[in-house]
Image: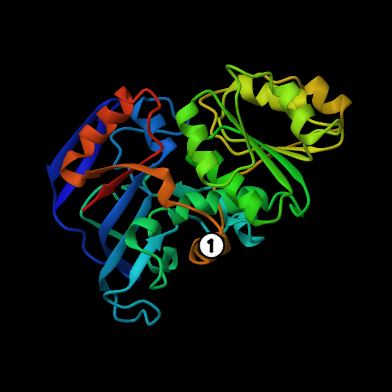
Amino acid sequence: MLQAVLKEPRKIEIREVPKPTLGGGDVLIKVRNLGICGSDIHIFYGKHIYKEYPIIPGHEISGEVAEVTPSIEKIKVGDKVTLRPQLTCRKCYNCLHGNYHICENLKVIGFHIPGAAGEYLSAPYQNIITLPDNISFEDGAMIEPVAVAVHALKKCENISGKKVLVFGAGPIGNLVAQTAKAYGAVSVMITDRVDFRLKIASDCGIDWYVNVLHKNLRQEILDKFGSNGADLILECVGIEDTIEEAIELTRKGTDVIIVGVPEGKLSVNLGLVQDRELKLIGSLMYKEEDFYEAIRLISEDKIKVKELITNRFPFKQYPEAFKFIDEGKNEFMKVMIYF
C-alpha cells in the first residue's frame, strides 16, 4: 500500500509499504478521507512541542472497515467509521477516574505512533466509532475537530444565554464558535487577522467577526456585547499575543479556555489572572462521548462542516497539499485528502 512519511520538517515522501495485519482486537480500515489538522501543519514545520521524526501523520479520518477480528461483534466489514486517535495506559490516576484523554502515558495516532496517512490503518476496536448513513465520508473526517470544540465548551457548565468571544477563525475556532451557537449562546464574536477566514465564519452564522488588524477589539466588544463584555472567552490560536489579549479583555471572575496548541513556553500576565480571579482553563482533545455529540450536531445540521473544506487533494498529492498550505498565504481553511 501507499503511505506518506514526514521524514523531517518540510520533507514528506510517499512510499510503498506492506498493508497492516490484524492483531488481537484490531480493525483494519480502508481510509477514504483524511483532514490535515493544524497540529499536522505544526509538525510539518517542526514547531509542535510534542514531536519525533520520522512521523506517519494523520488522525482526522473516515474510512470503511476492511477486516475485523472475528471475536469483535459490534463492528463489521463495510461499516463506515471514524477514529478516536488516543491510546491510553488504563492504569494511571486519570485513566482510572475517567479522564483518559489526559492519561499520564497518552500516545496519539499520527503523532507518537503511525497515523492514517496511508491507504490502510490498523487500530484497536475500542477506538473505532461507527458513523450513521447520513454522515458522508468527507463529513466523517470532520468529526474529530468538531469533538475538539465540543470538549472545549464542556469546560463551561452552561453556554445558554452567554456572550462568547472566540480568538482565531481557523477550523477549530470556527467550530468552537459554531458549537457555542448550537449550545444556545446568545451572541458569538470571532476574531482573526485574515478576512478569508472571517468570511467563512459569517457564512457559518457567527454573529460578529472582527479583523483585529483593522478594528479595535476592545471597542468592538463594548459595541456588540455592552459594558459587561464577554461571559466566556475561548483562545483557539495558541500564541502569546492572543492569550495575553484574552486575559486582558476578560471580565473579572470569568473564564478563559485555552484550546489552541502553543508552539512553546509562553509568558502571560498571571497578575491579572490573580487580581481578577480568572479561571485559565486548558482543554485537551476529547472523550469518546464528545465524538458522539459531534456526530449528533452534524447529523442535525446544527454545525456546518462542508463550508470549512476549501481544498481537496488526492492522496498521491499529499506532499503537494502541504506545499499548497505553505504557499497559501492563509487563503484556505480545511485541506482534505481523498483516496
| Residue 64 in the image, given as x and y percentages of width and height | 28, 67
Left or right, residue 143 beside residue 269:
left
SS class, disc 1 = helix
**Residue 123 can be seen in this image:** no
Q: Residue furthest left?
A: 16
Find disc 1 in the rendering and name its residue. Answer: 288
| Residue 263 in the image, given as x and y percentages of width and height | 51, 26
Give 266 or 103, whichever is nearer the viewer. 266
What amino acid is at disc 1?
A: Glu
Question: What residue appears at the point 82 percent right and 38 percent down from the top-left corner?
Answer: 254
Question: What residue appears at the point 28 percent right and 63 percent down from the top-left corner?
Answer: 29
Residue 21 vs 281, above or below: the answer is below
Residue 246 vs 215, above or below: the answer is below
Q: Callout 1: 10 Å neighbours few (<14), some, many (20+)?
A: some
Residue 269 vs 35, above or below: the answer is above
Say how many tags the image has: 1
Residue 293 vs 118, above or below: the answer is below
| Residue 55 in the image, given as x and y percentages of width and height | 30, 38
Give 273 or 230, whichever is nearer the viewer. 230
Question: What residue appears at the point 53 percent right and 62 percent down from the top-left corner?
Answer: 288
Left or right, residue 85 beside residue 338:
right
Left or right, residue 238 beside residue 314:
right
- Colour pattern of the rendering: rainbow
Left or right, residue 198 beside residue 129:
right
| Residue 66 in the image, given as x and y percentages of width and height | 23, 69
